[in-house]
Amino acid sequence: MTAGSPFRPDVGEHATAVVVGGGVAGLVVARDLGKAGRRVTLLEASARLGGEVQRHSVAGIDLDSGAESFATKTDAIQTLATQLGLGNEIVNPDPRGAWVIQPDGTAFELPKTGLLGIPGTPMAKDVIDVIGTGAALRAEMDSLLPGPVGAKEQKLGPLVRRRMGRAVLDKLVTPVVQGVHSAHPDDLDVERVAPGLRQALLHENSLARAVRALREASPAGSAVGGIRGGTVRLVDELAADLEMYGVEVRFGARVTAYEAHSVTLDTGEQLAADTVVVALGGRDAARLDGALDDGTSQGSTGSASETGLITLATLVVRDPALDAAPRGTGVLVAPGAPGIRAKALTHATVKWDWVAERAEGRHVLRLSYSAPAVGRATSDDELRSLAIDDASRILGLSVDPASVEGFARVEWDGPYRGAGSAGREVPGVVRVGGAVAGRGLAGVVADARLKVAEILSPEV
């Protein structure tokens, strides 16, 4: 089927749109198009909306089971939340900040003036405490290098390595980036995770000064924000708006093919539309386009691959020793740290006041794991024991298994950047979501709204 397919409808008083994918990007597009008067159908393969923004209940506490915060560098989430009636519900995390555990097992507070772990002041005491004086001096040499050095690097890892040395990359940037983006800096595009960094480097002739410039240009306050009651409330309000604006939502609707003006379901049904929007993450986009068969695609006979699998283990603990917040709001773990398989721990009841209020004296710990450290073959009992052991090592105290009042396990597909991750190019098809905007909630929302504006105001 082509763009000239007979299934293309005539554009009448109300143009039509089909949105493939009910994650946050798809919800935003469907909501905004519906509000603008388009007749919108949203197709979601699963039985729920929100993608990786979900909730679960652990020991009677309703919590985010996926993304629990968002970047505040732009006002994308603030604007959306305000439009959804949640503007007054945005909250900042506790200012105590996070820690990092080094490959040798030592723990330090994360330097305050960095960007994705890149120090804005390499010779600051909190940087020297983590990487040592020699490595800090090497990082300080960044200020003597010409601006173009490393500026053409497309990936974050090589850029940091060339400007500041391996120690900064391994001991600061890697644990932060893997904790935030579930990927090594060598695999991440600079412009996707740190927009404007390379341009600032050329302007400032120093990576450290570029970091400081970007931080100074950001809104005052914390680099991340949350929503009282969980970021999942965005999904609740978006879903309510879909109903208000007459958007048709179809669950269990699995798309097998699409073109500029039509979508085909696995039932053989074809839906025609003036606009087709594919709102998927990289892995789902590649599956749909046949560029990835990890055992989950239609007709596959293989077993599901664990490549990129992310497992979240949540513990609810009653232990007064945790009241002192021994590692601030959480810990990022460098690869190779002895005896620890988790890549990060969030002390949610320290980080968010609203979680502490709901926990009523208990503590909520969220530990994240990547495959193969934890896989689908890892039983719940094994994961619970592992999470307790890792929490003890990370926090520097002994968590008594008897003090654990609740445990939950959630699995997510990690980022996929292989063949087809950005989806195939189909003239006339609009793409939003993680496949084109990355995993950050703010970036996904900003990109989705930009694409909606382009749909509603096409170039003449």
Image (cartoon, helix red, strand yellow):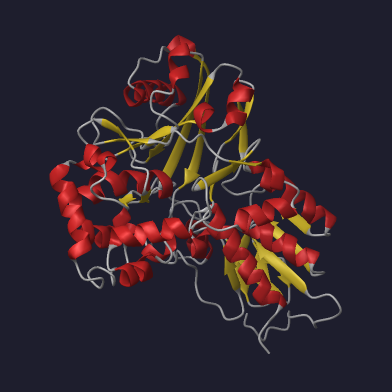
Q: Is residue 239 left or right of residue 191?
A: right
Furthest-left residue in view? 134
Residue 256: image x %, image y %? 60, 64
When the figure is inspected, residue 191 is found, relative to residue 114, above or below; the finding is below
Q: What residue sits 74% from the left and 73% below the top?
A: 272
Q: Is residue 304 left or right of residue 352?
A: left
Res 258 → quadrant = bottom right
When the figure is inspected, residue 425 is found, relative to residue 109, above or below; the finding is below
Res 145 → quadrant = bottom left
Q: Nearer the viewer, residue 125 or 192?
A: 125
In this rendering, does residue 253 appear at all? no
Residue 114: image x %, image y %? 36, 49
Q: What residue sits 36% from the left and 48% below the top?
A: 113
Q: What residue sits 49% from the left and 44% below the top?
A: 412
When the figure is inspected, residue 326 is found, relative to residue 211, above or below; the finding is above
**Total of numbered circles in the picture?**
0
Q: Is residue 254 left or right of residue 164?
A: right
Q: Nearer the viewer, residue 156 or 142?
A: 142
Q: Is residue 41 left or right of residue 406?
A: right
Res 104 → quadrant = top left
Q: Quadrant of the C terminus?
A: bottom right
Furthest-right residue in view? 13
In this rendering, does residue 169 appear at all? yes
Q: What residue sits 73% from the left and 79% below the top?
A: 7
Q: Nearer the viewer, residue 36 or 416?
A: 36
Residue 260: image x %, image y %? 64, 78
